[in-house]
Image (cartoon, grey):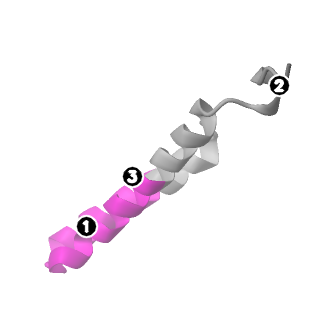
């Protein structure tokens, strides 16, 4: 994972914690969902086979 992706996710988690502490309700889970979507997308991109790994015979 790239460092800036981890920093963005950490920022989203801090934002979510601030929203929870201010009583934002269900809106507080939006940053957490965004972090999970970003991490899931990165894992999907890393797990799929690349062009070099394919056998085109």
Q: Is residue 46 magenta?
A: no
C-alpha span from label 1 to label 3:
11 Å
- The residue mark sitting in front, 3 or 2, is 2
Number of numbered discs present?
3
Identify the main secondary structure in magenta.
helix
User: Residue 51, which numbered label?
Assistant: none
Taking the image as drawn, is residue 38 in sight?
yes
Which residue was labeled with disc 3? 36
Q: Is residue 19 magenta?
A: yes
Quick one: quadrant of the N terminus?
top right
Question: Do the residues bearing badges 2 and 1 touch, measured as CB atoms within 8 Å?
Answer: no
Picture layout, residue 36 above or below residue 51: below
Q: Position of residue 31 (x, y in %)?
A: 36, 66
Q: Position of residue 30 (x, y in %)?
A: 32, 70
Residue at the (14%, 78%) spot, across then down: 25
The span picked out in magenta is 10-37
Residue at the (74%, 31%) spot, across then down: 50
The foreground one among 37 and 17 is 37
Secondary structure found at label 1: helix
Mark nearer the N terminus (1 vs 3)? 1
The foreground one among 11 and 35 is 35
Secondary structure found at label 2: helix
Quarter assignment of residue 34: bottom left
Which residue was labeled with disc 2? 52
- Judge the density around disc 1: few (<14), some (14-19), many (≥20) Cα neighbours within 10 Å: some
Q: Is residue 52 left or right of residue 50?
A: right
Which residue was labeled with disc 1? 29
């Amino acid at each position: 994972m790239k460092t800036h992706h981890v920093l963005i996710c950490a920022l989203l988690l801090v934002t979510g914690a601030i929203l929870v502490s201010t009583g934002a309700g269900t809106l507080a889970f939006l940053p957490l969902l965004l972090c999970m979507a970003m991490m899931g997308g990165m894992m999907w991109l890393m797990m799929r086979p690349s062009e070099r790994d394919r056998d085109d015979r």
